[in-house]
Image: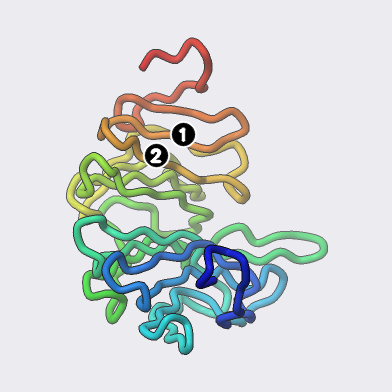
């Protein structure tokens, strides 16, 4: 939309069927990155991270994990628009069952606007990983949080060096990670992080302990 939402034009990526995130370059609105989750009940389609430099007239698939794995979450470092984190999720829903994870799920990072990507390791689970929720702390963008569903070592992870290494803080993940797994860093306190759950959760010690948000929560 170019008129505040009064009218809209379709700019493509229809074969993704599901868009997880749209990130616009803060200085050049013609540059946009899109997290494409891909079709829910079949492989293929448009999956991964797509980038446009002409306001959506054309798109380049700059990250394509596989025909079975899409990207559902995308975050830009507020200090540098060329630094982005993409969260990939290997999943497929069938009539009788669902694939909720695999070895291709993980967090990818680029420092050149999407030309090259590296999958982050350094302490994160790498095998049979489900949905991951992640955020960059607005209070300190070198601090990242991730809640990771995995067959082994699932839980809440924190990085203090922009994803180079990670420390497991607790076993907490959301109650239904296939549907939830969204977390948000506090804008002022680097140790405070929120998780969207059946009952929303908050941690004030960097993910070590979690409590249900409510009237008795002490700020």
Determine the residue positioned at 62% across, 49% down: 179
Seen at 53% across and 69% down, the residue is: 3
Local packing at callout 2 (Cα closer than 10 Å; few below 14, some 14-19, many 20+) is many
Q: Nearer the viewer, residue 206 or 114?
A: 114
Depicted 171 relative to depicted 48: above or below = above
Q: In the shown orientation, is residue 22 left or right of residue 53?
A: right
Quarter-of-image position of residue 62:
bottom left
Q: Secondary structure at mark 2?
A: strand
Q: Earlier in the sequence, mark 2 or mark 1?
A: 2
Q: Position of residue 211 (x, y in %)?
A: 47, 21
Q: Are marks 2 and 1 in contact (CB under 8 Å)?
A: yes
- Percent across and percent down for residue 47 are 53, 76
Asked where in the image residue 16 lies, by quadrant, the reply is bottom right
Res 103 seen here: no
Quadrant of the snapshot with the N terminus: bottom right
Residue 213 horizontal/vertical position (percent): 50, 22
Neighbours of disc 1 within 10 Å: few (<14), some (14-19), many (20+): some
Circle 1 residue: 172
Does residue 147 appear in this view? Answer: yes
The dot on residue 59 is none
Q: Secondary structure at mark 1?
A: loop
Please identify the quadrant where the C terminus is shown: top left
Q: Quadrant of residue 68?
A: bottom right
Disc number at residue 156?
A: 2
- Closer to the camera in the image, 156 or 56: 56
Q: Residue at x 41, y 61 (%)?
A: 74
Residue placed most toward the observer, 166 or 46: 46
Counting from the top left corner in percent of width and height, residue 64 is at 45, 79
Q: CA distance from mark 2 to mark 1?
A: 6 Å
User: Seen from this angle, which residue lies furthest right?
Assistant: 95
């Amino acid at each position: 939309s170019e008129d505040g939402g009064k009218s809209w034009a379709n700019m493509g990526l229809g074969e993704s069927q599901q868009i997880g995130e749209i990130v616009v370059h803060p200085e050049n609105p013609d540059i946009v990155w899109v997290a494409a989750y891909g079709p829910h009940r079949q492989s293929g389609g448009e999956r991964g991270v797509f980038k446009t430099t002409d306001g959506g007239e054309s798109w380049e698939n700059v990250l394509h994990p596989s025909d079975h794995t899409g990207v559902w979450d995308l975050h830009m470092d507020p200090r540098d628009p060329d630094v982005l984190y993409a969260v990939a999720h290997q999943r497929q829903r069938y009539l009788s069952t669902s694939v909720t994870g695999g070895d291709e799920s993980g967090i990818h990072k680029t420092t050149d606007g999407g030309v090259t990507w590296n999958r982050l390791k350094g302490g994160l689970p790498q095998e049979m990983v489900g949905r991951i929720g992640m955020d960059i702390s607005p209070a300190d963008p070198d601090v990242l949080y991730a809640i990771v569903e995995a067959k082994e070592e699932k839980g809440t992870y924190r990085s203090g060096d922009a994803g180079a290494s990670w420390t497991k803080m607790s076993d907490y993940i959301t109650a239904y990670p296939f549907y939830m797994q969204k977390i948000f860093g506090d804008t002022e306190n680097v140790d405070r992080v929120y998780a969207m759950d059946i009952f929303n959760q908050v941690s004030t010690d960097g993910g070590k302990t979690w409590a249900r948000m409510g009237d008795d929560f002490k700020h």
